Image (cartoon, helix red, strand yellow):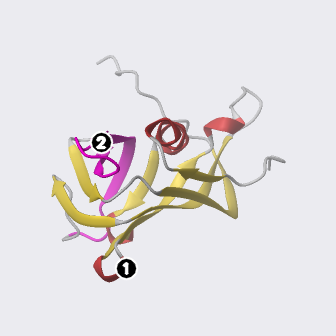
Amino acid sequence: MSELKPLRLLAEEAEDLEIISAAVQDSVVKAENLNYEARIRRFSLEINRYRWEEGVTKRRDGERVRSLLAFDGVLGVKTRAVTKADPELILSLLQVTFTPDEEPPGGKITLLFAGDGEIELTVEALDATLLDSDYIWNTRHTPSHERRKR
């Protein structure tokens, strides 16, 4: 296992969210681990995050870490091609973006998943947190976005 410390990141501006987006690219999440708590206006995902910051060498496997990605101040949630009907459905997170409203600080946070899945969060302001746990494991499967030749 690596000696890297767990990530603890906060995003309150679009540029901050770009850093979190890069860190969570290729994370996987079960549909049952998508949580919207309307009463406290929080949307969270319990993800298995690929540790891109660790790097991969031919002599060493990559690593994944159990993490929490949370958004506060969420006023509404819309989904496209994402359902909790099958709680075992595995989603692969590709990107997280923020589009500000004409009247700041509100806007829309979009979580884009492989296979055209999308979750759109309407937020009063950008308030995102990424917290890694201490649960880290090796993986031989490094995410790849190159198309396979048939």
Question: Left or right of 141: which side holds 38?
Answer: left
Element on which disc 2 rests: strand
Magenta-span inclusion, residue 103: yes
**Which residue, as the protein is rendered here, is positioned at the far front?**
103
Does 95 sit above or below residue 137? Answer: above
In contact (CB < 8 Å): disc 1 and disc 2: no
Mark 2 residue crowding within 10 angstroms, few (<14) / some (14–19) / many (20+): some
Task: Tell me the residue at 22%/41% (across/down).
Answer: 102
Foreground: disc 1 or disc 2: 2
Q: Is residue 129 left or right of residue 104?
A: right
* Residue 131 to residue 3: above or below: below
What amino acid type should be assigned to the residue bearing mark 2? Answer: Pro
Of marks 1 and 2, which one's residue comes earlier in the chain?
1
Q: Residue at x 34, y 42 (%)?
A: 98
Q: Give x and y (percent) for residue 131.
A: 60, 60
Residue 145, image x, y percentages: 41, 27
Image height of 137 relative to 149, above or below: below
Of 102 and 119, nearer the camera is 102
| Residue at 43% over, 39% down | 14
Residue stretch in magenta: 86-114
Q: Is residue 99 covered in magenta?
A: yes
Amino acid identity at mark 1: Ile
Query: Can you say whether 91 is above or below 141 in the image?
Result: below
Between 52 and 44, the residue placed more toward the observer is 44
Residue under numbered circle 2: 100
Quadrant of image for the C terminus: top left
